[in-house]
Image (cartoon, helix red, strand yellow):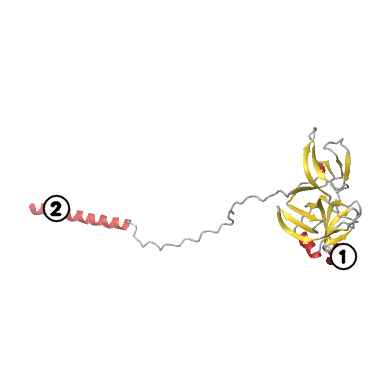
Amino acid sequence: MRSARLRRTIAAGVGLSLAVLASSAVNRQARPARSTPPPAVALPAPVRPAFSVPTPRPLPDRSAAALWAPVLRAVTARAEAAANSGEVARLSRATPEGTANIVLVLARRVDRAGRVWVKVSLPVLPNGTVAWVPRSSLGGYVDVAAHLVVDLRRLTATLTENGRRVFAAPVGVGKPAWPTPRGRFYIRNRLTGFHNPVYGPVAFGTSARSAVLTDWPAGGYVGIHGTNEAELIPGRVSHGCIRLRNRDILRLSKLMPVGTPVTIR
């Protein structure tokens, strides 16, 4: 009896041991196998930005800036900003040279009827004449930061941009019988392709006019141009126009845009 009971106890223990071993084996198979981690991959270099924010700096001095606008249609320039004011001059769309006519803008005013008027500098005699035209007769404003100063005593021309000198050269001006007029003017156009070497490779038309005589085409207007007689510069050699050596006028033509204010003193 005891032998049989002992045998059953031993058999049960062996069975339990086998079950535990079997369970352990199953658990070991179900667990993921441990593996060696992959080697670390180097990160790519950071992408270079398409642009970088520059260091802030103050805005340039625009004290020498001016505004000009093209004449879109023939218009009467009047003494005051009113439709019934006296006529000062007629402005056409084109200059005598066939380029777009432009005016220097000086001020703006709205009349009682709500109509906008613009005060402009006129290319007429007497020099320095200003008048008012309807804003609707002009095109869009163009901002110019350049300023040309012609010194009749020193016989020099100096161009500044935002108050900084960018060009200087000796010039020839009008003879005593045909003086270059003094005053405040502006560059009306830029011309090239002359058949006459007297004007050099480039010429600028100004709003200045001579009451005596000038060698500028269409008569009366003072030009700034090159010359085929560079040996006469500096000097008082012209009929009123301002002459530069050809190499100087070519250099100036790259720096001075149409609409630039001109002071002749």
Three-letter amino acid code at disc 1? Pro
Given contact means CB atoms under 8 Å apart, are the residues at marks 2 and 1 in contact?
Answer: no
Which of discs 2 and 1 lies nearer the camera? The answer is 1
Which corner quadrant of the image does residue 73 belong to?
top right
Q: How many labels does the image show?
A: 2
On the image, the x and y values in percent for residue 88 come to: 88, 42
Three-letter amino acid code at disc 2? Thr
Q: How crowded is mark 1: few (under 14 residues within 10 Å), some or many (20 or more)?
A: few
Up/down of 109 relative to 264, above or below: above
Q: Is residue 246 left or right of residue 58?
A: right
Q: Is mark 2 on a helix, strand or loop?
A: helix
- Residue ID for mark 1: 197
On the image, the x and y values in percent for residue 215 come to: 90, 58
On the image, the x and y values in percent for residue 66 come to: 75, 48
Q: Which residue sits at x=68%, y=50%?
A: 61
On the image, the x and y values in percent for residue 102 come to: 82, 49
Q: Is residue 100 left or right of residue 38?
A: right
141 or 28: which is nearer to us? 141
Q: Which residue sits at x=85%, y=64%?
A: 227
66 or 14: which is nearer to us? 66
Q: Which residue sits at x=77%, y=40%?
A: 108
Q: Residues within 10 Å of mark 2 (few under 14, many from 20)?
A: few
Mark carried by residue 9: 2
